[in-house]
Amino acid sequence: MKYKVGFVGGGINSVVGRVHKIAIEMDDRFEVVAGVFSRFKESNKKSAEIYNVRKFYPTIKDMIRNERLDVVCILTPTNRHVYDIEECLNLNEEIVIVSEKTIATSLSEIKTLKGYIKRNLFVTYNYTGYPMLRELREWVLNDKIGKVLNINLFMPQEGFLKKANNKKLAPQDWRRKDYEIPTIYLDLGIHLYSILSFILNSDVKIKSVKSLNKSFSQWGVIDSVSSILLLKDDIVVNIWFSKVALGHTNGLEVEVYGEKGSLRWHQLEPEYLYYCDDSGNKLKLDRGSDFVIEARKERYNRFKVGHPDGYIEAFANYYYDIAEILKNRESFSSVFVFDFADCEKGMEFLTMIKEGEICC
């Protein structure tokens, strides 16, 4: 059985639309059958043609009333998510929502959604779909590196300073506006929260935090954040996310240091996990290594080792997990998928980092 999906947003001119369309159908668990791809009529129509989707509609209301959908994917800009989710659930409170991160721009918006949400909302944090990042999590949880002492999470990008043809590239409109929580937190910071809670397999409880928020670019919004956190289990976490780090198209890196060893994963080398033990021995692991626990599973090996998986496959792994939840609705949970409760905790985390700002 394929679950029938409708897209809201995600047209051909969007950043994420094509990625979601390919990823959601990669393992043959979902089929995109309709969409409100764009508020512009021609773009909406063209998107349906290019995506080979039979039907497109001018409004969410028209789509939900005319289609028997199992899932609606919310792929509009972040500041639209809460409104689009509310509209979908007002029309059909049983429908499953899969939303791009984040589902809101503040804790107050999260609270407005609480009256709508039952157990039918999931948010895509695709980086946690990378097999070797999942492998890193397994090594941490299986005590391969001992007690965790320090975690470094970096997500530097260059988009706010990058030039093309000697002209600075203009970010999308929604990225040039800050809210109660700055947009860079909602765009990049939330990914680092998802990775942190994922690899620790627990709520992230902060004992203390200090943050430096800076605006370096011409766009007048916060574009670089550096934070140091002390968690309640005495793990020290260093976080840096930026839109002004020239030389980094996407430098996502995860480092975990324990009493017995360390682990490092870099998105630009997604197939490798680097391990070092307390005797100085070093290993470079991939999906085919003997020591690997999670990443050797058949579901991650669509093709043999040596032919790298990547960003879209990570998204597909995440959608595979959502399909497993829908298949087993009585349990309706997964260690790999983030739900509404996780979103609320993530927004609390971002709020604490923002409120930990120091003067500069």
Image: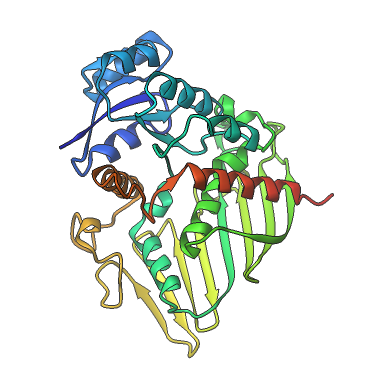
Establish if 347 lies above or below 220: below
**Residue 333 horizontal/vertical position (percent):** 36, 50
Name the residue rendered at 35%, 10% in the picture: 42
10 displayed left or right of 30: right
Q: Is residue 13 visible?
A: yes
Name the residue rendered at 57%, 51% in the picture: 156
Establish if 158 lies above or below 204: above
Q: Quadrant of residue 174?
A: top right
Q: Quadrant of residue 175?
A: top right
**Residue 51 horizontal/vertical position (percent):** 25, 25
Establish if 263 lies above or below 199: below
Could you say which is closer to the camera, residue 200 or residue 252? 200
**Residue 23 horizontal/vertical position (percent):** 29, 40
84 displayed left or right of 355: left
In the displayed orientation, state which residue is furthest to the bottom.
Answer: 279
Name the residue rendered at 55%, 50% in the picture: 247
